[in-house]
Image (cartoon, grey):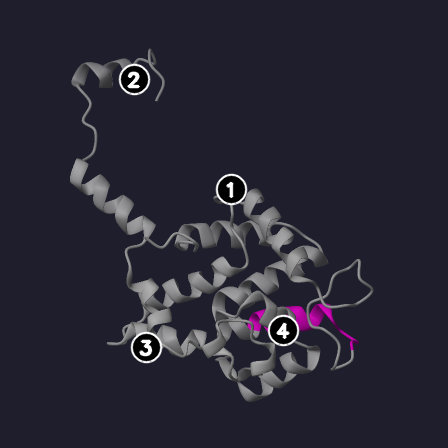
Amino acid sequence: MLKKYLPEDEQRRLRNTLKQTAGPVARRDGGTIELLTHTGMRIGECLHLSVGDAVAALKTGYIFLAKETRKGRADEKRDHEVLVTVPVRAALNELLALREGAALDEALIVSRKSGGQAMSVRAFEQRVAYWAKQAGLPDGVSPHWFRHTRAMNIMRRTTSPDPLGIVKAALGHSSIRSTEVYARQTRENVEAALREVDGKPRLRLADLRKMHEGRVSL
């Protein structure tokens, strides 16, 4: 059973938590999380993007990921392009706004403590853990969860007759075997099915009266 992804309600909670927090750090982290969630990029690929890469993506409609920057399985290390959809465009514009005045060859996502250097994977892992805790999400949420989340969003929302093929292309998998994990049961599907099987607990009339009279807590 696939567990390391965010269902729809947890995505909303994380997004709302970030939106309710003002300041450039929350904007940077929110923009990066949106970019990861709507592209399925690995965090190393995302943090490798330059200001020029983002500008080019907005012009061409695709984020280009050179094979040298991809850190996946050995058979996936080839050039890959990611479509710039509406939410991806919004995330890129948000991140570029935070880098106003930066040269095209400078990093798009930087640490405030590094003097303009690209943010490290470890540093962003810590940021994700912080925001996940603030949003009340499960322990262990990491940037890679957003890659799985992208795949699961496609599986749930697409009307394509070949959803696994769409996921394969979107994530840049070279083999469908890498994609088949997303066809397994999801945690919310399993939970919903078990609740359906066991049924809802039924309360006696006397219990309902006690609740109504406030003698027991709900």
Identified by mark 3, the residue type is Gly
- The quadrant holding residue 170 is bottom left
Please, what secondary structure does the residue beneath circle 4 have? helix
Q: Residue at x 30, y 13 (%)?
A: 213
Crowdedness near tag 4: few (<14), some (14–19) or many (≥20) residues, C-alpha within 10 Å: some
Asked if residue 86 is positioned above or below residue 184 in the image, the reply reads below
Q: Position of residue 97 (x, y in %)?
A: 70, 71
Q: Position of residue 180 (x, y in %)?
A: 31, 67
Crowdedness near tag 1: few (<14), some (14–19) or many (≥20) residues, C-alpha within 10 Å: few
Q: Residue at x 56, y 88 (%)?
A: 60
Nearer-N-terminus badge (4/1): 4
Nearer-N-terminus badge (2/3): 3
Dot label at residue 211: 2
Asked if residue 196 is positioned above or below residue 29 in the image, the reply reads above
Please, what secondary structure does the residue beneath circle 2 have? helix
Nearer-N-terminus badge (1/3): 1
Would you name the residue on which mark 1 appears? 136
- Residue at the extreme front: 74
Q: Are marks 1 and 2 in contact (CB under 8 Å)?
A: no
Q: Which is in the foreground here, disc 4 or disc 3?
A: 3
Write down the region rendered in magenta: 90-102
Would you name the residue on which mark 3 appears? 165
Main SS, magenta residues: helix
Please, what secondary structure does the residue beneath circle 3 have? helix
Give the camera-side residue of 189 and 100: 189
3D distance between C-alphas at marks 2 and 3 = 52 Å
Dot label at residue 31: none
Q: Residue at x 80, y 62 (%)?
A: 114
Q: Which is in the foreground here, disc 4 or disc 2?
A: 4
Would you name the residue on which mark 4 appears? 93
- Residue at the extreme top: 215
Q: Are marks 1 and 3 in contact (CB under 8 Å)?
A: no
